[in-house]
Image (tube, rainbow, N blue to C red):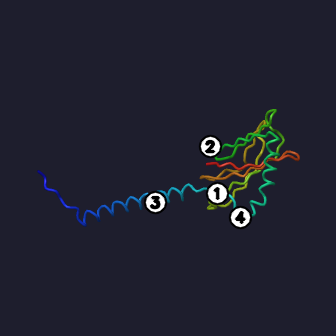
């Protein structure tokens, strides 16, 4: 028969160190992941944004009525390619501009100008720096415009 060992203060100390070690390790991992994946603030001032909300909704509905679609991609040289279309096909004759902003503001904004490179296709004149960027795209043709934000890596 085995001798039964008593639960001592050392055992309790080991249990407490193990428990709090796991809790602290999980908190450190979660805080690290949160800091690395946080993409920044949505708005700087929520009160001001709330005052603009109805106007933003109206602008969004007007954009939807246009039926314009935009697809953004980054090519091998890190130039941004925009493909525009409407309900009838490629969207030509548009003025396309964008500003690439770093989600956490660690890098300076990168203005991008676009030139037409075919039916409904537009290519940026400059390259997007490495990393994750929010591309704030603005497309204008006549009195109509489209604004969108796309995350690019």
Disc 3 versus disc 1: distance between alpha carbons?
27 Å
Q: Earlier in the sequence, mark 1 or mark 4?
A: 4
Label ID, residue 88:
none
Query: Between 136 and 80, which is closer to the camera in this rendering?
Result: 136
Q: Is mark 1 on a helix, strand or loop?
A: loop
Q: Position of residue 136 (x, y in %)?
A: 72, 52
Q: Residue at x 64, y 45 (%)?
A: 77
Disc 2 versus disc 1: distance between alpha carbons?
20 Å
Q: Which residue lies furthest to the top in this view?
A: 88
Q: Which of marks 2 and 3 is nearer the N terminus?
A: 3
Q: Position of residue 9 (x, y in %)?
A: 25, 67
Label ID, residue 102:
1
Q: What element carries label 3?
A: helix
Residue on which the image places disc 2: 76
Q: Where is residue 146 in the image (x, y as percent from the top left)?
A: 79, 47
Disc 4 versus disc 3: distance between alpha carbons?
29 Å
Can you tell which of label 2 and label 3 is closer to the viewer? 3
Residue on which the image places disc 3: 27
Q: Position of residue 130 (x, y in %)?
A: 60, 52
Residue 23 visible? The answer is: yes
Tags 2 and 3 in contact by the CB under 8 Å rule?
Answer: no
Q: Horizontal placement of 29 versus 152: left or right?
A: left
Residue 96 visible? The answer is: no
- Give above or below for 18 relative to 119: below
Residue on which the image places disc 4: 45
Q: Is mark 2 on a helix, strand or loop?
A: loop
Q: Horizontal placement of 73 versus 10: left or right?
A: right
């Amino acid at each position: 028969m085995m001798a039964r060992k008593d639960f001592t203060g050392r055992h309790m100390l080991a249990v407490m160190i193990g428990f709090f070690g796991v809790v602290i390790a999980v908190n450190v991992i979660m805080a690290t992941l949160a800091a690395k994946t946080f993409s920044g603030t949505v708005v700087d001032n929520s009160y001001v944004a709330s005052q603009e909300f109805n106007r933003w909704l109206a602008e969004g509905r007007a954009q939807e009525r246009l039926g314009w679609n935009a697809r953004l991609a980054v090519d091998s040289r890190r130039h941004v390619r925009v493909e525009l279309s409407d309900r009838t096909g490629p969207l030509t004759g548009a003025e396309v501009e964008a500003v690439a902003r770093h989600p956490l503001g660690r890098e300076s904004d990168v203005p991008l100008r676009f030139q037409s490179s075919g039916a409904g296709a537009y290519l940026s004149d400059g390259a997007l720096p490495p990393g994750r960027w929010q591309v704030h795209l603005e497309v204008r043709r006549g009195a109509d415009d489209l604004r969108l934000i796309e995350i690019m890596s």
